[in-house]
Amino acid sequence: MTDKPRFAEASMEAMYRIFTVPEAPDSTLGKIDQKLSQNLAGFLSEHIVAVEKDLKELEQDFQESRIPETPIFVSDQADFLMEKLVAQSVHTASPSFIGHMTSALPYFMLPLSRIMMALNQNLVKIETSKAFTPMERQVLGMIHRLIFERDDAFYQKWMHEPGHSLGSFCSGGTIANITALWVARNQKLGATENFRGIQREGLFGALKHYGYNGAAVLVSERGHYSLGKAADVLGIGRDFLVSIKTDNRNKARIPELRDKIKQLQDDNIAIIGMVGVCGTSETGSVDRLDEMADIAQEIGCHFHVDAAWGGPTLFSKKYRHILNGIERADSVTIDAHKQMYVPMGAGMVVFRDPTLVSAIEHHADYIIRKGSKDLGSYTLEGSRPGMAMLLQSGLKIISRSGYEILIDQGIEKARLFADMIKADPAFELITEPELNILTYRYLPDFVRTKLATASAAETDQIVDAMNRLTKKIQKTERARGKSFVSRTTLMPEEYDRRRTVVFRVVLANPLTNHQILKDVLEEQKQIAASADCAELMAELRALCEPPALKVKAG
Ligand SMILES: Cc1ncc(COP(=O)(O)O)c(C=O)c1O
Protein backbone atom coordinates (compact mmCIF):
# COMPACT_ATOMS: atom_id res chain seq x y z
CA MET A 1 0.00 0.00 0.00
CA THR A 2 1.31 3.47 -0.83
CA ASP A 3 2.12 5.58 2.20
CA LYS A 4 0.62 8.77 0.79
CA PRO A 5 -3.13 8.46 0.40
CA ARG A 6 -4.29 8.65 -3.21
CA PHE A 7 -7.75 9.86 -3.98
CA ALA A 8 -10.09 9.13 -6.85
CA GLU A 9 -12.76 11.48 -7.99
CA ALA A 10 -16.46 11.54 -7.18
CA SER A 11 -18.13 12.57 -10.42
CA MET A 12 -21.13 11.37 -12.36
CA GLU A 13 -18.76 9.94 -14.94
CA ALA A 14 -16.96 7.95 -12.23
CA MET A 15 -20.31 6.71 -10.92
CA TYR A 16 -21.22 5.51 -14.43
CA ARG A 17 -17.86 3.78 -14.65
CA ILE A 18 -18.26 1.76 -11.48
CA PHE A 19 -21.58 0.38 -12.70
CA THR A 20 -20.27 -0.57 -16.14
CA VAL A 21 -18.94 -4.02 -16.94
CA PRO A 22 -15.18 -3.67 -17.60
CA GLU A 23 -14.60 -4.41 -21.28
CA ALA A 24 -10.90 -5.10 -21.65
CA PRO A 25 -9.81 -8.51 -20.34
CA ASP A 26 -6.68 -6.88 -18.92
CA SER A 27 -8.61 -4.09 -17.20
CA THR A 28 -7.47 -2.82 -13.83
CA LEU A 29 -10.36 -4.62 -12.15
CA GLY A 30 -9.44 -7.85 -13.93
CA LYS A 31 -5.89 -7.55 -12.59
CA ILE A 32 -7.11 -6.79 -9.08
CA ASP A 33 -9.37 -9.81 -9.30
CA GLN A 34 -6.45 -12.05 -10.29
CA LYS A 35 -4.23 -10.71 -7.56
CA LEU A 36 -6.92 -11.19 -4.93
CA SER A 37 -7.56 -14.76 -6.05
CA GLN A 38 -3.84 -15.58 -5.76
CA ASN A 39 -3.55 -13.95 -2.36
CA LEU A 40 -6.66 -15.69 -1.08
CA ALA A 41 -5.41 -19.05 -2.32
CA GLY A 42 -2.18 -18.36 -0.44
CA PHE A 43 -4.07 -17.51 2.73
CA LEU A 44 -6.29 -20.57 2.49
CA SER A 45 -3.40 -22.96 1.94
CA GLU A 46 -1.63 -21.82 5.11
CA HIS A 47 -2.08 -24.20 8.00
CA ILE A 48 -1.58 -21.85 10.88
CA VAL A 49 -4.87 -21.20 12.65
CA ALA A 50 -4.16 -17.54 13.48
CA VAL A 51 -1.49 -16.16 15.71
CA GLU A 52 -3.39 -14.14 18.24
CA LYS A 53 -2.90 -10.43 17.81
CA ASP A 54 -4.19 -8.10 20.45
CA LEU A 55 -7.71 -7.02 19.48
CA LYS A 56 -6.98 -3.53 20.77
CA GLU A 57 -4.17 -3.31 18.22
CA LEU A 58 -6.45 -4.50 15.40
CA GLU A 59 -9.06 -1.95 16.41
CA GLN A 60 -6.57 0.80 15.58
CA ASP A 61 -7.10 0.06 11.89
CA PHE A 62 -10.84 0.54 12.31
CA GLN A 63 -10.95 3.73 14.38
CA GLU A 64 -12.30 6.26 11.88
CA SER A 65 -15.99 6.94 12.38
CA ARG A 66 -16.41 9.56 9.66
CA ILE A 67 -17.56 8.33 6.26
CA PRO A 68 -14.82 9.31 3.76
CA GLU A 69 -15.66 12.42 1.84
CA THR A 70 -13.41 11.56 -1.10
CA PRO A 71 -13.32 8.22 -2.93
CA ILE A 72 -10.27 5.97 -3.05
CA PHE A 73 -9.18 3.55 -5.75
CA VAL A 74 -10.38 -0.07 -5.71
CA SER A 75 -6.77 -1.27 -5.85
CA ASP A 76 -5.95 0.64 -2.68
CA GLN A 77 -8.99 -0.73 -0.88
CA ALA A 78 -8.06 -4.24 -2.07
CA ASP A 79 -4.57 -3.78 -0.64
CA PHE A 80 -6.05 -2.51 2.62
CA LEU A 81 -8.37 -5.53 2.85
CA MET A 82 -5.57 -7.99 2.19
CA GLU A 83 -3.25 -6.41 4.70
CA LYS A 84 -5.59 -5.46 7.50
CA LEU A 85 -8.46 -7.87 7.18
CA VAL A 86 -7.49 -11.06 5.38
CA ALA A 87 -4.11 -11.33 7.09
CA GLN A 88 -5.82 -10.95 10.48
CA SER A 89 -8.66 -13.39 9.84
CA VAL A 90 -9.09 -16.80 11.42
CA HIS A 91 -8.08 -19.78 9.28
CA THR A 92 -11.33 -21.63 9.72
CA ALA A 93 -10.27 -23.81 6.76
CA SER A 94 -7.14 -25.07 8.52
CA PRO A 95 -7.35 -28.80 9.33
CA SER A 96 -6.02 -28.03 12.80
CA PHE A 97 -8.89 -25.58 13.44
CA ILE A 98 -11.10 -28.15 15.13
CA GLY A 99 -12.92 -26.04 17.67
CA HIS A 100 -16.00 -24.75 15.93
CA MET A 101 -18.72 -25.70 13.51
CA THR A 102 -17.37 -23.25 10.95
CA SER A 103 -14.84 -25.12 8.87
CA ALA A 104 -13.38 -25.54 5.38
CA LEU A 105 -15.40 -25.17 2.17
CA PRO A 106 -15.02 -27.20 -1.00
CA TYR A 107 -13.13 -24.98 -3.45
CA PHE A 108 -15.79 -25.11 -6.13
CA MET A 109 -17.98 -22.94 -3.87
CA LEU A 110 -15.68 -19.98 -4.52
CA PRO A 111 -16.13 -19.58 -8.30
CA LEU A 112 -19.78 -20.64 -8.16
CA SER A 113 -20.59 -18.08 -5.50
CA ARG A 114 -19.62 -15.38 -8.01
CA ILE A 115 -22.73 -16.26 -10.00
CA MET A 116 -24.84 -15.45 -6.98
CA MET A 117 -23.06 -12.16 -6.34
CA ALA A 118 -23.09 -11.11 -9.98
CA LEU A 119 -26.79 -11.81 -10.56
CA ASN A 120 -27.86 -10.40 -7.19
CA GLN A 121 -31.25 -12.11 -7.30
CA ASN A 122 -33.71 -11.49 -4.49
CA LEU A 123 -35.64 -14.59 -3.50
CA VAL A 124 -38.39 -12.65 -1.81
CA LYS A 125 -40.41 -12.68 -5.03
CA ILE A 126 -40.27 -14.17 -8.50
CA GLU A 127 -40.15 -10.71 -10.07
CA THR A 128 -36.59 -10.39 -8.74
CA SER A 129 -35.49 -14.00 -8.87
CA LYS A 130 -37.26 -15.87 -11.66
CA ALA A 131 -35.44 -19.24 -12.07
CA PHE A 132 -33.94 -18.92 -8.61
CA THR A 133 -37.38 -19.45 -7.04
CA PRO A 134 -38.11 -22.86 -8.61
CA MET A 135 -34.52 -23.80 -7.82
CA GLU A 136 -34.97 -22.90 -4.15
CA ARG A 137 -38.25 -24.80 -4.10
CA GLN A 138 -36.42 -27.81 -5.55
CA VAL A 139 -33.72 -27.59 -2.87
CA LEU A 140 -36.38 -27.41 -0.14
CA GLY A 141 -37.97 -30.45 -1.78
CA MET A 142 -34.69 -32.38 -1.74
CA ILE A 143 -34.09 -31.63 1.93
CA HIS A 144 -37.71 -32.44 2.75
CA ARG A 145 -37.31 -35.77 0.98
CA LEU A 146 -34.03 -36.49 2.77
CA ILE A 147 -35.90 -36.18 6.07
CA PHE A 148 -39.49 -37.25 5.41
CA GLU A 149 -38.99 -39.60 2.44
CA ARG A 150 -42.35 -38.99 0.79
CA ASP A 151 -42.96 -40.44 -2.67
CA ASP A 152 -42.57 -38.85 -6.11
CA ALA A 153 -46.27 -37.99 -6.29
CA PHE A 154 -45.99 -35.92 -3.11
CA TYR A 155 -43.15 -33.80 -4.46
CA GLN A 156 -44.84 -33.51 -7.86
CA LYS A 157 -47.84 -32.09 -6.11
CA TRP A 158 -46.26 -29.80 -3.55
CA MET A 159 -42.79 -28.69 -4.55
CA HIS A 160 -43.88 -25.91 -6.91
CA GLU A 161 -47.44 -25.52 -5.67
CA PRO A 162 -48.54 -21.85 -5.49
CA GLY A 163 -49.79 -20.75 -2.10
CA HIS A 164 -47.65 -23.42 -0.35
CA SER A 165 -44.07 -24.16 0.51
CA LEU A 166 -42.28 -27.21 1.91
CA GLY A 167 -40.22 -24.90 4.09
CA SER A 168 -38.28 -21.66 4.35
CA PHE A 169 -34.76 -21.05 3.22
CA CYS A 170 -33.12 -18.52 5.53
CA SER A 171 -29.82 -17.19 6.79
CA GLY A 172 -29.23 -19.92 9.37
CA GLY A 173 -30.37 -22.11 12.22
CA THR A 174 -31.45 -19.20 14.39
CA ILE A 175 -33.99 -17.88 11.90
CA ALA A 176 -35.02 -21.45 11.06
CA ASN A 177 -35.76 -22.20 14.73
CA ILE A 178 -37.66 -18.94 15.17
CA THR A 179 -39.68 -19.67 12.03
CA ALA A 180 -40.56 -23.19 13.22
CA LEU A 181 -41.75 -21.96 16.60
CA TRP A 182 -43.57 -19.05 14.96
CA VAL A 183 -45.56 -21.60 12.94
CA ALA A 184 -46.12 -23.71 16.07
CA ARG A 185 -47.32 -20.70 18.07
CA ASN A 186 -49.70 -19.49 15.38
CA GLN A 187 -51.08 -23.01 14.90
CA LYS A 188 -51.66 -23.51 18.60
CA LEU A 189 -53.29 -20.13 19.09
CA GLY A 190 -54.94 -19.91 15.70
CA ALA A 191 -58.20 -18.30 14.63
CA THR A 192 -61.57 -19.62 15.77
CA GLU A 193 -65.08 -18.48 15.11
CA ASN A 194 -64.82 -15.44 17.36
CA PHE A 195 -61.06 -14.97 17.43
CA ARG A 196 -58.97 -13.75 14.51
CA GLY A 197 -55.84 -15.62 15.55
CA ILE A 198 -52.69 -14.63 17.43
CA GLN A 199 -51.14 -13.12 14.31
CA ARG A 200 -53.93 -10.50 14.33
CA GLU A 201 -54.85 -10.12 17.99
CA GLY A 202 -51.47 -10.76 19.64
CA LEU A 203 -50.40 -13.05 22.45
CA PHE A 204 -52.37 -11.24 25.12
CA GLY A 205 -55.58 -11.57 23.14
CA ALA A 206 -54.85 -15.20 22.31
CA LEU A 207 -54.22 -16.23 25.91
CA LYS A 208 -57.34 -14.37 27.01
CA HIS A 209 -59.40 -15.98 24.27
CA TYR A 210 -58.17 -19.51 24.98
CA GLY A 211 -58.10 -19.01 28.74
CA TYR A 212 -54.42 -19.91 29.18
CA ASN A 213 -52.13 -18.46 31.85
CA GLY A 214 -49.13 -18.43 29.52
CA ALA A 215 -47.40 -20.32 26.73
CA ALA A 216 -44.31 -22.51 26.81
CA VAL A 217 -41.82 -24.46 24.72
CA LEU A 218 -39.87 -27.44 26.06
CA VAL A 219 -36.28 -28.31 25.19
CA SER A 220 -33.34 -29.98 26.88
CA GLU A 221 -30.81 -27.89 28.78
CA ARG A 222 -28.45 -28.52 25.82
CA GLY A 223 -30.83 -26.71 23.44
CA HIS A 224 -29.25 -23.97 21.34
CA TYR A 225 -29.49 -20.39 22.65
CA SER A 226 -31.37 -19.39 19.49
CA LEU A 227 -34.41 -21.04 21.08
CA GLY A 228 -34.18 -18.51 23.92
CA LYS A 229 -34.26 -15.73 21.34
CA ALA A 230 -37.26 -17.41 19.69
CA ALA A 231 -39.12 -17.54 23.01
CA ASP A 232 -38.30 -13.88 23.51
CA VAL A 233 -39.33 -12.53 20.08
CA LEU A 234 -42.45 -14.71 19.96
CA GLY A 235 -43.63 -13.17 23.19
CA ILE A 236 -43.52 -16.46 25.10
CA GLY A 237 -40.72 -15.21 27.33
CA ARG A 238 -37.37 -16.83 28.00
CA ASP A 239 -38.56 -18.16 31.36
CA PHE A 240 -41.17 -20.15 29.51
CA LEU A 241 -38.57 -21.95 27.43
CA VAL A 242 -38.76 -24.85 29.83
CA SER A 243 -35.45 -26.61 30.28
CA ILE A 244 -35.32 -30.38 30.63
CA LYS A 245 -32.30 -31.84 32.40
CA THR A 246 -30.14 -34.19 30.37
CA ASP A 247 -28.80 -37.61 31.33
CA ASN A 248 -25.15 -38.65 31.24
CA ARG A 249 -25.37 -38.91 27.44
CA ASN A 250 -26.60 -35.31 27.16
CA LYS A 251 -30.06 -36.36 26.00
CA ALA A 252 -33.28 -34.92 27.45
CA ARG A 253 -34.51 -37.09 30.33
CA ILE A 254 -37.86 -38.43 29.21
CA PRO A 255 -39.39 -38.86 32.71
CA GLU A 256 -38.50 -35.24 33.51
CA LEU A 257 -40.01 -34.14 30.21
CA ARG A 258 -43.24 -35.87 31.19
CA ASP A 259 -43.18 -34.27 34.64
CA LYS A 260 -42.65 -30.80 33.20
CA ILE A 261 -45.52 -31.30 30.73
CA LYS A 262 -47.80 -32.37 33.56
CA GLN A 263 -46.79 -29.31 35.56
CA LEU A 264 -47.48 -26.97 32.63
CA GLN A 265 -50.83 -28.60 32.04
CA ASP A 266 -51.71 -28.28 35.72
CA ASP A 267 -50.72 -24.60 35.57
CA ASN A 268 -52.88 -24.12 32.48
CA ILE A 269 -49.95 -23.07 30.30
CA ALA A 270 -50.34 -23.66 26.55
CA ILE A 271 -47.62 -25.99 25.26
CA ILE A 272 -46.67 -24.42 21.95
CA GLY A 273 -44.10 -27.01 21.07
CA MET A 274 -41.45 -29.45 22.10
CA VAL A 275 -37.96 -29.32 20.60
CA GLY A 276 -35.77 -32.37 20.11
CA VAL A 277 -32.11 -31.62 19.50
CA CYS A 278 -30.27 -33.54 16.85
CA GLY A 279 -26.62 -32.72 17.35
CA THR A 280 -26.33 -30.44 20.37
CA SER A 281 -23.93 -27.57 19.77
CA GLU A 282 -21.68 -28.47 22.68
CA THR A 283 -21.60 -32.26 22.65
CA GLY A 284 -23.17 -33.35 19.34
CA SER A 285 -25.74 -35.48 21.17
CA VAL A 286 -29.06 -36.55 19.71
CA ASP A 287 -32.24 -36.64 21.79
CA ARG A 288 -34.50 -39.72 21.83
CA LEU A 289 -36.51 -38.34 18.95
CA ASP A 290 -38.86 -41.31 18.63
CA GLU A 291 -39.92 -41.15 22.27
CA MET A 292 -40.34 -37.39 22.06
CA ALA A 293 -42.46 -37.78 18.92
CA ASP A 294 -44.68 -40.21 20.87
CA ILE A 295 -45.16 -37.68 23.65
CA ALA A 296 -45.85 -34.82 21.24
CA GLN A 297 -48.46 -36.97 19.55
CA GLU A 298 -50.01 -37.92 22.89
CA ILE A 299 -50.42 -34.33 24.03
CA GLY A 300 -51.07 -32.94 20.54
CA CYS A 301 -48.25 -30.41 20.39
CA HIS A 302 -45.93 -29.33 17.62
CA PHE A 303 -42.72 -31.38 17.53
CA HIS A 304 -39.75 -29.46 16.19
CA VAL A 305 -36.34 -31.02 15.69
CA ASP A 306 -33.32 -28.73 15.72
CA ALA A 307 -31.05 -30.67 13.38
CA ALA A 308 -29.02 -27.59 12.40
CA TRP A 309 -25.86 -29.59 13.01
CA GLY A 310 -26.84 -33.26 12.99
CA GLY A 311 -29.38 -33.32 10.13
CA PRO A 312 -26.92 -34.23 7.38
CA THR A 313 -26.21 -37.50 9.22
CA LEU A 314 -29.25 -38.63 7.22
CA PHE A 315 -26.93 -38.88 4.20
CA SER A 316 -25.20 -41.81 5.89
CA LYS A 317 -26.77 -45.23 5.50
CA LYS A 318 -24.60 -46.44 8.35
CA TYR A 319 -25.45 -43.76 10.91
CA ARG A 320 -28.83 -42.33 9.94
CA HIS A 321 -30.48 -44.64 12.46
CA ILE A 322 -29.14 -42.38 15.22
CA LEU A 323 -31.76 -39.86 14.06
CA ASN A 324 -34.70 -42.28 14.13
CA GLY A 325 -37.88 -40.37 14.84
CA ILE A 326 -36.83 -37.19 12.99
CA GLU A 327 -39.23 -38.18 10.20
CA ARG A 328 -42.08 -37.79 12.69
CA ALA A 329 -41.26 -34.14 13.42
CA ASP A 330 -43.66 -31.42 12.32
CA SER A 331 -40.71 -29.21 11.44
CA VAL A 332 -36.95 -29.65 11.17
CA THR A 333 -34.16 -27.06 11.16
CA ILE A 334 -31.14 -27.97 9.09
CA ASP A 335 -28.16 -25.76 8.26
CA ALA A 336 -26.48 -26.04 4.89
CA HIS A 337 -23.64 -23.83 6.12
CA LYS A 338 -22.64 -26.40 8.68
CA GLN A 339 -22.32 -30.04 7.58
CA MET A 340 -23.32 -29.41 3.97
CA TYR A 341 -20.25 -27.24 3.46
CA VAL A 342 -22.01 -24.25 1.91
CA PRO A 343 -20.73 -20.73 2.74
CA MET A 344 -22.42 -19.05 5.66
CA GLY A 345 -25.94 -17.72 5.31
CA ALA A 346 -27.71 -20.94 4.36
CA GLY A 347 -30.24 -22.41 6.78
CA MET A 348 -33.60 -24.09 6.30
CA VAL A 349 -36.66 -25.16 8.14
CA VAL A 350 -38.84 -27.76 6.44
CA PHE A 351 -42.35 -28.77 7.40
CA ARG A 352 -43.67 -32.32 7.15
CA ASP A 353 -47.08 -30.98 6.20
CA PRO A 354 -46.80 -28.39 3.40
CA THR A 355 -49.96 -26.63 4.53
CA LEU A 356 -48.41 -25.75 7.91
CA VAL A 357 -46.66 -22.64 6.61
CA SER A 358 -50.05 -21.05 6.06
CA ALA A 359 -49.86 -20.20 9.77
CA ILE A 360 -47.25 -17.53 9.01
CA GLU A 361 -48.26 -16.63 5.47
CA HIS A 362 -48.08 -12.94 4.73
CA HIS A 363 -48.74 -10.87 1.64
CA ALA A 364 -48.23 -7.42 0.28
CA ASP A 365 -49.96 -5.86 -2.65
CA TYR A 366 -46.89 -4.81 -4.58
CA ILE A 367 -45.03 -8.12 -4.06
CA ILE A 368 -45.63 -11.60 -2.63
CA ARG A 369 -49.25 -11.53 -3.76
CA LYS A 370 -51.77 -14.13 -2.61
CA GLY A 371 -51.69 -17.31 -4.66
CA SER A 372 -48.24 -16.54 -6.12
CA LYS A 373 -45.26 -18.86 -5.93
CA ASP A 374 -43.20 -16.17 -4.19
CA LEU A 375 -41.21 -17.72 -1.37
CA GLY A 376 -41.17 -14.43 0.50
CA SER A 377 -44.69 -15.25 1.69
CA TYR A 378 -43.30 -17.83 4.11
CA THR A 379 -40.10 -16.28 5.38
CA LEU A 380 -39.29 -14.15 8.39
CA GLU A 381 -36.62 -12.37 6.41
CA GLY A 382 -37.46 -10.06 3.52
CA SER A 383 -34.78 -9.71 0.86
CA ARG A 384 -32.72 -12.89 0.62
CA PRO A 385 -29.81 -13.92 -1.59
CA GLY A 386 -29.79 -16.99 -3.84
CA MET A 387 -27.80 -19.16 -1.41
CA ALA A 388 -29.94 -22.13 -2.39
CA MET A 389 -27.92 -22.14 -5.62
CA LEU A 390 -24.82 -23.11 -3.68
CA LEU A 391 -26.64 -25.83 -1.80
CA GLN A 392 -28.08 -27.19 -5.02
CA SER A 393 -24.53 -27.20 -6.39
CA GLY A 394 -23.26 -29.05 -3.32
CA LEU A 395 -26.04 -31.61 -3.51
CA LYS A 396 -25.21 -32.29 -7.16
CA ILE A 397 -21.43 -32.00 -7.18
CA ILE A 398 -20.87 -33.86 -3.90
CA SER A 399 -24.08 -35.95 -4.11
CA ARG A 400 -25.64 -38.07 -1.39
CA SER A 401 -22.83 -40.60 -1.50
CA GLY A 402 -20.17 -37.89 -1.25
CA TYR A 403 -21.87 -36.34 1.76
CA GLU A 404 -22.15 -39.83 3.22
CA ILE A 405 -18.36 -40.22 3.01
CA LEU A 406 -17.87 -36.83 4.72
CA ILE A 407 -20.33 -37.67 7.48
CA ASP A 408 -18.97 -41.18 8.06
CA GLN A 409 -15.35 -40.07 8.23
CA GLY A 410 -16.25 -37.29 10.71
CA ILE A 411 -18.04 -39.68 13.04
CA GLU A 412 -15.30 -42.27 12.77
CA LYS A 413 -12.55 -39.71 13.31
CA ALA A 414 -14.31 -38.48 16.44
CA ARG A 415 -14.39 -42.06 17.74
CA LEU A 416 -10.70 -42.47 16.93
CA PHE A 417 -9.89 -39.22 18.75
CA ALA A 418 -11.97 -40.34 21.74
CA ASP A 419 -9.93 -43.56 21.84
CA MET A 420 -6.68 -41.57 21.68
CA ILE A 421 -7.84 -39.42 24.59
CA LYS A 422 -8.90 -42.44 26.66
CA ALA A 423 -5.59 -44.17 25.97
CA ASP A 424 -3.60 -41.17 27.19
CA PRO A 425 -3.43 -40.94 31.00
CA ALA A 426 -2.94 -37.17 30.78
CA PHE A 427 -6.47 -36.62 29.49
CA GLU A 428 -10.03 -37.33 30.45
CA LEU A 429 -12.80 -37.81 27.92
CA ILE A 430 -15.86 -35.96 29.20
CA THR A 431 -18.40 -36.78 26.50
CA GLU A 432 -18.23 -39.75 24.12
CA PRO A 433 -18.98 -38.61 20.59
CA GLU A 434 -22.34 -39.71 19.26
CA LEU A 435 -21.76 -37.77 16.03
CA ASN A 436 -18.52 -35.87 15.36
CA ILE A 437 -18.28 -33.60 18.42
CA LEU A 438 -16.59 -34.54 21.68
CA THR A 439 -15.36 -32.88 24.83
CA TYR A 440 -12.39 -33.66 27.05
CA ARG A 441 -9.86 -32.03 29.30
CA TYR A 442 -6.29 -32.31 30.43
CA LEU A 443 -6.17 -34.16 33.76
CA PRO A 444 -2.82 -34.62 35.53
CA ASP A 445 -2.50 -38.06 37.14
CA PHE A 446 -2.13 -36.65 40.67
CA VAL A 447 -5.47 -34.87 40.23
CA ARG A 448 -7.12 -38.00 38.90
CA THR A 449 -5.82 -39.98 41.91
CA LYS A 450 -6.99 -37.36 44.40
CA LEU A 451 -10.44 -36.99 42.83
CA ALA A 452 -11.09 -40.70 43.38
CA THR A 453 -11.13 -40.18 47.16
CA ALA A 454 -11.68 -36.45 47.59
CA SER A 455 -14.45 -35.13 49.82
CA ALA A 456 -17.18 -32.95 48.29
CA ALA A 457 -15.50 -29.78 49.56
CA GLU A 458 -12.11 -30.87 48.23
CA THR A 459 -13.65 -31.78 44.87
CA ASP A 460 -15.21 -28.32 44.64
CA GLN A 461 -11.81 -26.72 45.06
CA ILE A 462 -10.11 -29.07 42.63
CA VAL A 463 -12.79 -28.68 39.95
CA ASP A 464 -12.48 -24.91 40.30
CA ALA A 465 -8.71 -24.97 39.84
CA MET A 466 -9.03 -27.50 37.02
CA ASN A 467 -11.49 -25.17 35.26
CA ARG A 468 -8.98 -22.37 35.37
CA LEU A 469 -6.27 -24.72 34.08
CA THR A 470 -8.43 -25.90 31.15
CA LYS A 471 -9.22 -22.30 30.29
CA LYS A 472 -5.55 -21.36 30.46
CA ILE A 473 -4.47 -24.22 28.20
CA GLN A 474 -7.19 -23.42 25.66
CA LYS A 475 -6.35 -19.73 25.58
CA THR A 476 -2.61 -20.37 25.30
CA GLU A 477 -3.16 -22.85 22.47
CA ARG A 478 -5.33 -20.30 20.67
CA ALA A 479 -2.74 -17.56 21.14
CA ARG A 480 0.06 -19.74 19.77
CA GLY A 481 -1.96 -20.22 16.61
CA LYS A 482 -0.82 -23.71 15.61
CA SER A 483 -4.10 -25.41 16.40
CA PHE A 484 -7.45 -24.51 17.90
CA VAL A 485 -10.01 -26.29 20.06
CA SER A 486 -12.87 -24.38 21.66
CA ARG A 487 -14.07 -24.63 25.24
CA THR A 488 -17.40 -24.82 26.97
CA THR A 489 -18.81 -25.55 30.40
CA LEU A 490 -20.74 -28.74 31.09
CA MET A 491 -22.24 -30.24 34.22
CA PRO A 492 -21.19 -33.89 34.03
CA GLU A 493 -23.02 -36.47 36.14
CA GLU A 494 -19.75 -37.99 37.36
CA TYR A 495 -18.86 -34.65 38.92
CA ASP A 496 -22.27 -34.37 40.54
CA ARG A 497 -23.24 -31.77 37.94
CA ARG A 498 -20.49 -29.38 39.01
CA ARG A 499 -19.72 -26.76 36.37
CA THR A 500 -16.78 -28.23 34.50
CA VAL A 501 -14.80 -26.43 31.81
CA VAL A 502 -13.90 -28.72 28.91
CA PHE A 503 -12.24 -28.59 25.52
CA ARG A 504 -14.71 -28.98 22.69
CA VAL A 505 -13.72 -30.52 19.38
CA VAL A 506 -15.74 -30.55 16.16
CA LEU A 507 -14.39 -32.90 13.50
CA ALA A 508 -15.86 -31.65 10.25
CA ASN A 509 -12.85 -30.85 8.10
CA PRO A 510 -12.01 -33.96 6.03
CA LEU A 511 -8.35 -32.86 5.93
CA THR A 512 -7.92 -33.21 9.71
CA ASN A 513 -5.86 -36.37 10.11
CA HIS A 514 -4.57 -38.67 12.83
CA GLN A 515 -1.24 -36.83 13.04
CA ILE A 516 -2.96 -33.47 13.57
CA LEU A 517 -5.04 -34.92 16.40
CA LYS A 518 -1.92 -36.44 17.95
CA ASP A 519 -0.16 -33.07 17.68
CA VAL A 520 -3.07 -31.31 19.39
CA LEU A 521 -2.76 -33.59 22.43
CA GLU A 522 1.02 -33.22 22.44
CA GLU A 523 0.78 -29.43 22.30
CA GLN A 524 -1.73 -29.34 25.13
CA LYS A 525 0.58 -31.46 27.28
CA GLN A 526 3.46 -29.12 26.50
CA ILE A 527 1.39 -26.08 27.41
CA ALA A 528 0.36 -27.68 30.70
CA ALA A 529 4.02 -28.30 31.52
CA SER A 530 5.10 -24.80 30.43
CA ALA A 531 5.65 -21.67 32.51
CA ASP A 532 2.24 -20.43 31.33
CA CYS A 533 0.54 -22.97 33.58
CA ALA A 534 3.14 -23.29 36.35
CA GLU A 535 1.17 -21.33 38.93
CA LEU A 536 -2.05 -23.25 38.35
CA MET A 537 -0.26 -26.59 38.40
CA ALA A 538 1.35 -25.64 41.73
CA GLU A 539 -2.07 -24.73 43.12
CA LEU A 540 -3.46 -28.08 42.00
CA ARG A 541 -0.52 -29.94 43.53
CA ALA A 542 -1.10 -28.16 46.80
CA LEU A 543 -4.76 -29.20 46.70
CA CYS A 544 -4.08 -32.79 45.74
CA GLU A 545 -0.88 -33.84 47.42
CA PRO A 546 -0.41 -34.04 51.19
CA PRO A 547 2.05 -31.44 52.50
CA ALA A 548 5.59 -32.83 52.85
CA LEU A 549 6.40 -33.86 56.42
CA LYS A 550 8.38 -31.22 58.20
CA VAL A 551 11.50 -32.73 59.73
CA LYS A 552 12.35 -31.10 63.03
CA ALA A 553 15.79 -29.63 63.02
CA GLY A 554 18.18 -30.90 65.64
C1 LIG B 1 -28.07 -27.03 17.29
C2 LIG B 1 -28.00 -25.64 16.72
N1 LIG B 1 -29.13 -24.98 16.44
C3 LIG B 1 -29.13 -23.74 15.95
C4 LIG B 1 -27.95 -23.09 15.70
C5 LIG B 1 -27.98 -21.68 15.18
O1 LIG B 1 -27.51 -21.64 13.88
P1 LIG B 1 -26.99 -20.30 13.19
O2 LIG B 1 -25.72 -19.95 13.88
O3 LIG B 1 -26.79 -20.75 11.78
O4 LIG B 1 -28.04 -19.28 13.33
C6 LIG B 1 -26.74 -23.73 15.96
C7 LIG B 1 -25.47 -23.05 15.72
O5 LIG B 1 -24.42 -23.46 16.06
C8 LIG B 1 -26.76 -25.05 16.48
O6 LIG B 1 -25.65 -25.70 16.77
Image (cartoon, rainbow, N blue to C red):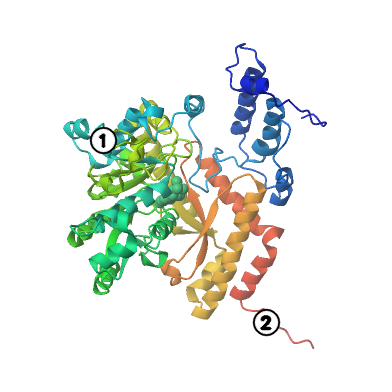
Name the spot of residue 241 as percent of width and height, x first.
Answer: 37, 63
Q: Secondary structure at mark 2?
A: loop
Queried on whether the Cβ of the residue with tag 2 lies below 8 angstroms from ligand 1, the answer reads: no
Q: Is residue 35 above or below residue 147?
A: above
In the picture, measured across the screen, residue 541 lies left or right of residue 64, that is: left
Name the spot of residue 506 as percent of width and height, x first.
Answer: 47, 47
Q: Is residue 56 above or below residue 69?
A: below
Q: Earlier in the sequence, mark 1 or mark 2?
A: 1
Q: Which residue is mark 2?
A: 549
Residue ID at (37%, 25%): 130
Q: Which residue is mark 1?
A: 371
- The quadrant of the picture occupied by the N terminus is top right
Q: What amino acid is at disc 1?
A: Gly
Name the spot of residue 119 as percent of width and height, x first.
Answer: 47, 25
Q: What amino acid is at disc 2?
A: Leu
Q: Nearer the viewer, mark 1 or mark 2?
A: 1
- The quadrant of the picture occupied by the C terminus is bottom right
Q: Is residue 530 above or below residue 552?
A: above
